[in-house]
Structures are given as C-alpha cells and as structure tokens.
C-alpha cells in the first residue's frame, strides 16, 4: 500500500510516475455500493485529472475471493459516479480497477485470474520493482505504459503513509502502536485492543469487519506477549482491559518496547523449519 | 524590573520606550562587551512563545506556578512569578504569544524556561534555524552582527570529530558578508550555525538595534523607537507563523472522513545532511531519548542495514511524528494534528549540534 501511494506523491527523490502524469491520491480505504447494491471495498482511489481516469486499487496480501473479484470486474464508471466517490468530472470518466500484490502472493492472484478471467490488471511489488503481470490491460494507455515497463523504487519503499495490516509481523505492529502505548501510559489510562486500533490506525472505520477483528487479534496477541515477557512486562491485563505499568517511566517504556522489537525481529527473521524444507524441495 | 503592572497597550508602550531610552544611555556609558554582562542588563526585550493551548487552559494548567493579572485589554496580561512581576504577556496572536520584559535577561530566560521546559507544557520556543536567522537579518536596514554556536552532540566513540565545537560573536555592519566568507571555509562550514543575528531597523523617524536569537528572543540593544522594535517583532512573528502554516497545511498528514472513504493529504519532509551519520543506532538513541533540546521519545526498527524507522512522540505537545533515517538524510512524516514546531525545533537543533549545512526540504526545495 505504501509503495503504491508513494507513486502519487510530489516529493522528489522517489519515483513518482503517477504524480508526473497528473494523478493524485484521492481516498484511502474506500467502501461504496455498486448500482446493484453490492459493497466494494478497494484500498485506494487515484484520480488522473488529465485523462479523467479514476484508478481503484485493491491491495491483496493473499488470494482473491471470487465474489469480490466479480464485483470489481462488473464495476463501471457509472457506479463510481452514482456512489459519488470522486471529484473528477463525471462526463467521459474512465474507470480502471486493479489488484496489487507482492511477489509472495503473485501466483495466487494470477491463478485466480487464469481460472475466472476477471479481466483486471494485476500489479506486483517484487523486491523494489512494481510491475504489471499477466495479460490484462488498463483502459488508460498511460497506466499500461508505466506499469508494463515497471517502476524501480531505488532501494526505498516509504513506510509512513499507511500504518499496518494484520499480515505485518509482531515487531512491526508493536512499533506502529508504540506511540499510542506511550499516550496511554502518559495519561495513565486503561484501554482495550479496539482503543489502540482506533488511535493507531486512521483508516479504522473503513476496514471491513473481518480485517478489524484480525487487527484487534494481533494487538491483543502482542500485548499478551508483552505481559508474559520475562524481561519487560510493562503491559498488565485487567478484566478485558489493559494498562501500562504505572510504576515505570517513559525511558523504561522506550527501552522495553525497543528491546522487544529487536528480540521479536530476530525470531521473525529466522526461517521456520517448514519454510526451509519447502525452499529446499523447490 | 519595576513592579508596575501594565494597564493597557499604551501603558506597555510607554514602559518599554522609556526603558529603551534609559538602557541606550547606559550602553553609551558602559558598552556591554561580554555576553555575561549583557545577560545581566535590563534591556527591553521580547520573547516569542509558540502556544498549543488556549490562554485560559494554560492559566489553569500553571495555577500555583504563575499568576496572571489582567489589564484593560483582554489580550494583554501581567505575569507574576514567585511574587515578582516577570513580564507582560501579549496573546493577541493565539499561536505566537509575546512575553515583553524590562528585567535582566537572565531572569527572563529562567521564566521562559519555567514556562516551556516541562513535558506536555504545550508552550514552546519558536526555533529559528541558521537559514531563518539569515533571512531575518535582512529585515533590517543594515546588518549589525551575528553570533554562532555549534556543539557537536553526535561525536562517535573513538572517532575524531569532523566538525569542531565553536562559538563566535561579531558586531559590525559587515555581518552578512562575513557569514558568506566564513561559509567558504571547508574546515568550519559544518559548524557555521547561527544562533543570533543583529540588525538595525528604522521605522518612521526612529531606529532600534536588535539582537534576534535562534530561540525567538528579540532584544533591543539600543535605539530610540519602541515602534521600530514592535515592527521587527511583528515581522519575525509573521515569518514564523507563515513557516508553521506551510508545514501544517502542506506537510502534515490529514485524514478527512468522507461517506465513502478517507481523503488523505500531506507530503513527507526531508532533512538532507552534508555530514554522514556514522552510527545510525547511536545517532537515533541520542536524538530520541527524551533529552533537551530535541524533546523526542521514540522507538526504532531497522528496515534495511542503513535505514531505520522511528515512531516518535513530541514531548512538548504529545504529537506523533514518524521518521525514516538514513546516513545522509531523514524523511519526516508529520502525523495529523501534530504541531509543526517539532520540525522547526528538530531542524534548528540538528544544525547547531550535527550539521550546520543540513537543509529542510519539502517537495524539491528548501523550506527554512
């Protein structure tokens, strides 16, 4: 998500082909009905003023649900206009819808497309290269030109635009929620997983229920791990609520979070046995 | 400082004007040559304060420490600290207050420290970077001097410093030319961080010679026109207000809820260094360990061997700010509702403690 968003930014020093073509990020975390009343939930809408082209992108970390893909495939510019999701002029609006994924789930996305022929372009972040894969084309030729050729992110994928998802590792999510833990500690508040999610994830209201539950589960799991940690037990559970140990100071809190991020990162970077064997056999 | 609360703006003007004339006469008799002597002088001076809180809430939060005595003007207050009149607080600009004083500079510094240093004080200094001070120097008819102070806080253990600590004061009209000359010296350019600029400003038929510090204190060294002092103050205040406005309108993230999603705006900022950070972890530990002057709390995660992500909190206001730090630059993501003063504080202090040549870049050009 951060990689796609970065293509629309004004900042020099990172590749920004969509910005250079007059595209701007319009919305994050969309949820709107098509004209049949079915809800679609793309992650990004990117508005191309020059060509009156609206690009909707759904970023996937796994495969694609058939019903969801069918809804996207049926989506037309009239749906976008009827749902009033863009400030682009409605006359001659061209709607493009795309899936975006990473190398690890590329085959799942391509297999789903091969099987069901949704006709949606698929863009993949492979290492530092963002490129269109498969045969499907955007309606807008500029997008085809940009994504066929591929965009090399030059060693840096910005991380600051989108917070975290349930697929992220514990060490990453702990860092993402650290500022909220600090705030709860400074104000001496009790809190739930939902409180943390609300404060740490600005797109909380637009996540679907399943994703929200997954994220709350991740946060709860992380807090439980902190509570059980033999060295840094700064989170305390209290009747379905949490609290940061009020006896510690902010410097200790920093040290504790930092130590856990580093400890968990090391474990996460060690390949699991199953991954090792599957790599060996392939 | 005479224990005379001001009744209104006219009264304030009279007190400051009278003190300006008196102190100019003292200066004619005994010119202050040393900084220590100067700080003991009771010159007319004004400190800009960056406020993230309404005056009413501030009064409540500081009850017991400061006492505020009202004047006839609801935006002008007398401040009393430990039973003594500490200054006159002008809150006409709700974001950038001005504390005027005719007491000793040392006393004023203590009072300002008491107002700003506590965590979550919501009152901070404005932070005028070296580049900003150069621009402010040009507000005057002529330049009148400069001071620079560089303290290398990022010395690496066992390594020889590539930039030495240095301090310098110069009084004279050739200040801006001299700064340009000094910048050509490769050996010292990394430490050429201004922390004060002098200027002579004329207004109507009067003048004032001012010293503007990087922490937003504007001290009238001599002169005959308090209106000229007010004019300089107003220009510095406007300059800084514009800077905060640009940072907060273009470079601060904003999430606007719409019926179908969240409209996002805001761009990343960059601080680009000419000096390379040798040890990223040590640098980050130093910067985000809550100490002055950075006042940042933050935790870090390695993204790549030479690239760290930091999620930080500004202890002045509790605002959130994220970073990606590499050996020659840092990318800054100013989160929604975070006060942009944290960026000015960070940048100004990095110039005076790490690399005076660093630049704050937005989109593709320097901002301050």
Image (tube, grey):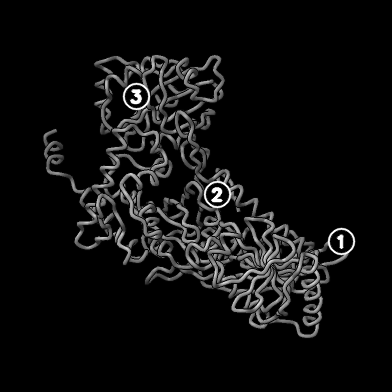
Element at label 3: strand
Residue B40 shown left or right of residue A58 in the figure: right
Secondary structure at badge 1 equals loop
Instruction: Please state the chain letter of the residue tagged with numbered disc 3 in the rendered image.
Output: A
CA separation, marks 1 and 3?
Answer: 68 Å
Callout 2: chain: B
Quarter assignment of residue B277 = bottom left
Q: Residue furthest bottom?
A: B30
Give the quadrant of the N terminus of chain B: bottom right
* Crowd around label 3: few <14 · some 14–19 · many ≥20 (10 Å): many
Residue under the point 57% across and 48% down = B247
The CA span between labels 2 and 1 is: 37 Å
The residue where tag 3 is placed is: A122
Q: Residues within 10 Å of mark 2 (few under 14, many from 20)?
A: some
Find disc 2 in the rendering and name its residue.
Answer: B361
Q: Nearer the viewer, mark 1 or mark 3?
A: 1
Measuring from the top left, give residue B86's x and y in whole percent: 65, 74
Do the residues at pointers 2 and 1 share their chain? yes
- Mark closest to the chain's N terminus, 2 or 1: 1
């Amino acid at each position: 998500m951060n990689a796609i968003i970065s293509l629309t930014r004004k900042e020099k020093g990172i590749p920004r082909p969509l910005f250079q073509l007059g595209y701007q990020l319009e919305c994050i975390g969309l949820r709107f009905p098509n004209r049949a009343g079915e809800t679609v939930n793309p992650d990004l809408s990117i508005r191309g003023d020059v060509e009156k082209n609206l690009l909707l992108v759904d970023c996937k970390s796994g495969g694609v649900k058939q019903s969801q893909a069918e809804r996207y495939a049926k989506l037309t510019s009239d749906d976008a206009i009827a749902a009033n999701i863009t400030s682009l002029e409605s006359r001659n609006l061209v709607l493009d819808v795309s899936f975006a994924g990473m190398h690890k789930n590329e085959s799942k996305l391509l297999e789903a497309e091969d099987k069901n022929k949704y006709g949606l372009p698929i863009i993949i972040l492979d290492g530092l290269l963002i490129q269109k894969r498969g045969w499907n084309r955007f309606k807008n030729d500029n997008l085809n030109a940009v994504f066929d050729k591929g965009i090399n992110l030059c060693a840096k994928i910005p991380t600051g635009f989108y917070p975290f998802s349930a697929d992220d590792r514990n060490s990453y999510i702990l860092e993402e929620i650290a500022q909220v833990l600090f705030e709860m500690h400074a104000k001496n508040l009790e809190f739930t997983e939902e409180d943390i999610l609300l404060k740490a994830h600005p797109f909380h209201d637009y996540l679907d229920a399943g994703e929200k539950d997954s994220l709350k589960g991740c946060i709860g799991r992380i807090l439980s791990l902190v509570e059980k940690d033999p060295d840094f037990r700064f989170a305390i559970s209290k009747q379905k609520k949490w609290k940061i140990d009020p006896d510690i100071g902010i410097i200790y809190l920093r040290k504790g979070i930092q130590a856990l991020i580093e400890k968990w990162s090391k474990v996460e970077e060690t390949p699991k046995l199953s991954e090792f064997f599957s790599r060996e056999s392939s | 400082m005479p224990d005379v609360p001001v009744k209104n703006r006219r009264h304030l003007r009279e007190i400051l004007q009278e003190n300006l004339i008196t102190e100019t006469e003292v200066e004619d008799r005994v010119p202050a040559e040393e900084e220590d002597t100067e700080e003991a002088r009771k010159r007319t001076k004004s400190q800009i304060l960056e406020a993230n809180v309404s005056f009413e809430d501030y009064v409540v939060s500081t009850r017991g420490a400061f006492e505020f005595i009202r004047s006839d003007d609801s935006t002008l207050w007398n401040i009393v600290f430990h039973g003594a009149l500490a200054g006159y607080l002008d809150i006409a600009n709700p974001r950038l207050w001005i504390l005027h004083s005719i007491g000793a500079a040392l006393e004023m510094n203590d009072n300002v420290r008491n107002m700003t240093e506590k965590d979550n004080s919501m009152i901070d200094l404005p932070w005028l970077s070296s580049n900003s001070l150069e621009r402010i120097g040009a507000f005057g008819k002529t330049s009148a001097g400069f001071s620079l102070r560089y303290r290398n806080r990022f010395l690496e253990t066992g390594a020889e410093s590539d930039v030495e600590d240095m301090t310098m004061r110069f009084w004279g009209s050739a200040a801006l030319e001299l700064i340009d000359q000094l910048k050509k010296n490769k050996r010292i350019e990394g430490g050429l961080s201004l922390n004060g600029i002098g200027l002579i400003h004329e207004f109507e038929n009067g003048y004032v010679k001012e010293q503007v510090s990087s922490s937003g204190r504007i001290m009238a060294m001599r002169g005959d026109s308090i209106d000229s002092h007010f004019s300089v103050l107003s220009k510095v205040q406007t300059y800084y207000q514009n800077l905060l406005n640009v940072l907060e309108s273009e470079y601060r993230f904003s999430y606007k809820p719409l019926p179908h999603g969240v409209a996002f705006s805001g761009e990343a900022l960059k601080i680009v260094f000419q000096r390379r950070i040798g040890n990223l972890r040590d640098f980050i530990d130093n910067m985000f360990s809550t100490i002055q002057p950075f006042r940042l709390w933050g935790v870090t995660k390695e993204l790549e061997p030479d690239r760290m992500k930091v999620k930080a909190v500004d202890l002045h206001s509790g605002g959130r700010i994220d970073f990606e730090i590499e050996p020659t630059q840092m990318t800054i993501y100013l989160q929604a509702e975070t006060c942009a003063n944290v960026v000015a504080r960070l940048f100004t202090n990095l110039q005076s403690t790490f690399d005076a040549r660093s630049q704050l870049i937005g989109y593709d050009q320097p901002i301050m």
